Image (tube, grey):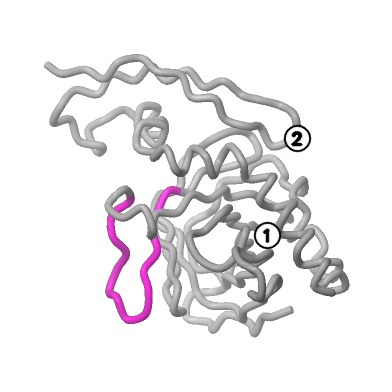
Amino acid sequence: MIVKTLKVIRLPLVRPGAILAFVVALPIAAGVSLAAAPRASRDSLWRLAITSQDRGRLRNWRQAWVVGLEQARAAGEGDAIAREGVLLDPDAGLENPALPDGDYACRTIKLGHKTAGQLAYVAYPAFRCRMAGDRFVKLSGSQRPEGHVWPFDPLRMIFLGAMALGDEPRALDYGRDADRDMLGVVERIGARRWRLVLPQPTWESQIDVVELVPVAAGANPPAGGA
């Protein structure tokens, strides 16, 4: 039997300056399926699946957010940022972050830019996303994150997934293409309001903040935008 060895991954807490040491001691025998693993083990598997690139994204999520806000304000978007309130406040996460199953209106705001001359603030209209079990997928739009959501700490869930583009029927599996891989943090920011935060995406922005608001089955998501 082949058993993975013990390793330690250090990840940041929600509040600045704090560090949480995760000791990963999860023996996974070759050939054991995720479905067959105990629930506690399944909840920990993201720590084994996460790539080194996404460990860096998770470690530096706050820096990416601060840089994105600074670039957007420098571009004259301070009023737009202020109108969004807690959505764009990096410290607004509340306890009990689990995202219930169902459909959501998901509205993306891109903060910052990768290169000079790019827009530093872009707000898109709402599209439709869905949470089912531990799987999250954006159902419409030209850039569609798709992947799994895992427990992390009392204020956050972890999203590991990949980006589907254009008319592609689905995203690649996580870990297949570093340019498409995505690391996200799910937080609750209101009674029935969540956000998916995607630091350092491959293209365009410093950080993407996706507002998630439940919608009734069959209903169209509300119009969004800045």
Give the residue number, with chain letter if any, for mark 1.
192
Question: Considering the image in quadrants, where does the C terminus appear?
Answer: bottom right
Label 2, secondary structure: give it: loop
User: Vertically, is 215 above or below 64?
Assistant: below
Q: In this view of the protein, which residue sits in the foreground, 101 or 13? A: 13
The percent position of residue 70, horizontal first and vertical second, equals: 79, 59
CA distance separating discs 2 and 1: 25 Å
Determine whether, in the image, residue 207 is placed left or right of residue 177: right
Type of amino acid under label 2: Pro
**Residues rendered magenta in the picture:** 160-174
Q: Earlier in the sequence, mark 2 or mark 1?
A: 2
Residue 60 lies left or right of residue 45; in this view the side is: right
Q: Is residue 92 magenta?
A: no
> Which residue is drawn at the image coordinates 64% and 49% (left, top)?
187
Label 2 Cα neighbours within 10 Å, binned few <14 / some 14-19 / many ≥20: few
x, y percent for residue 160 = 43, 48
* Amino acid bearing label 1: Arg
Residue 138 position (above or below residue 59): below
> Which residue bears the numbered disc 2?
16
Q: Quadrant of residue 25?
A: top left
Where does the image place residue 133, in percent across and percent down from the top left? 40, 51
Residue at horizontal 76%, vertical 67%? 72
Which secondary structure dominates the residues rendered in magenta? loop
Badge 1 marks a residue whose secondary structure is loop
Using the image, determine if residue 97 lies above or below residue 161. Answer: above
- Front one among 137 and 190: 137
The foreground one among 129 and 102 is: 129
Is residue 213 visible in the rendered structure shown here?
no
